[in-house]
């Protein structure tokens, strides 16, 4: 299985921005060079396990949160991601999203 380093980098960037953290701030907290963190966020470099763990710790998330699209058994991480996406939605927005998910699921299963 090949890891999608671009997706991992995008997820790191999104989590960093959600926490209103700069690249320099995350680099310092994770003991990385800012230029290396930039490469990681763009998916331009492969990151090793120690780097992944230090970034996860600096962001206050689990490593599976950064890797979940590469894991076969990551149901809880997907559920948490959905919860995070919905938590700032109004009731009406949640109903619309639910309807869209049902329609999408039905369409996917038809093909």
Image (cartoon, rainbow, N blue to C red):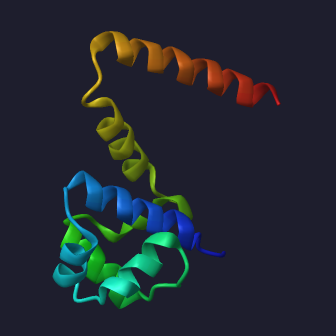
Q: Residue furthest right?
A: 111
Q: Which of 3 and 74 is in front in this view?
A: 3
Residue drawn at (30%, 90%), measured in percent from left and top? 33
Q: Position of residue 13 (x, y in %)?
A: 37, 63
Residue drawn at (41%, 60%), measured in percent from left and top? 11
Q: Where is residue 74 in the image (x, y as percent from the top left)?
A: 45, 56
Residue drawn at (53%, 63%), measured in percent from left and top? 7
Residue drawn at (52%, 14%), measured in percent from left and top? 99
Q: Residue 100 falls in which quadrant of the image? A: top right
Q: Residue 53 falls in which quadrant of the image? A: bottom left
Is 106 on the left-hand or right-hand side of 39? right
Is 33 on the left-hand or right-hand side of 104? left
Total numbered circles: 0
Is 72 on the left-hand or right-hand side of 66? right
Q: Nearer the viewer, residue 102 or 88?
A: 88
Q: Where is residue 4 in the image (x, y as percent from the top left)?
A: 59, 69
Q: Position of residue 19 (x, y in %)?
A: 19, 56
Q: Is residue 74 above or below residue 78?
A: below
Residue 72 seen in the current view: no
- Quadrant in the picture for the N terminus: bottom right
Q: Which of 67 and 21 is in front in this view?
A: 21
Residue 98 seen in the current view: yes
Q: In this view, does 63 lie above or below 20?
A: below
Q: Is residue 37 above or below residue 60?
A: below
- Quadrant in the picture for the C terminus: top right
């Amino acid at each position: 299985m090949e890891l999608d380093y671009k997706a991992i980098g995008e997820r790191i960037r999104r989590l960093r921005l959600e926490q209103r953290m700069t690249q320099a701030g995350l680099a310092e907290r994770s003991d990385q060079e800012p230029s290396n963190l930039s490469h990681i966020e763009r998916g331009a470099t492969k990151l090793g396990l120690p780097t992944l763990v230090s970034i996860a710790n600096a962001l206050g998330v689990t490593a599976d949160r950064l890797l979940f699209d590469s894991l076969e058994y990551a149901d809880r991480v997907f559920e948490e991601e959905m919860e995070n996406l919905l938590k700032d939605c109004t009731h009406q927005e949640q109903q619309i999203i639910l309807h869209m998910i049902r329609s999408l699921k039905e369409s996917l299963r038809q093909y």
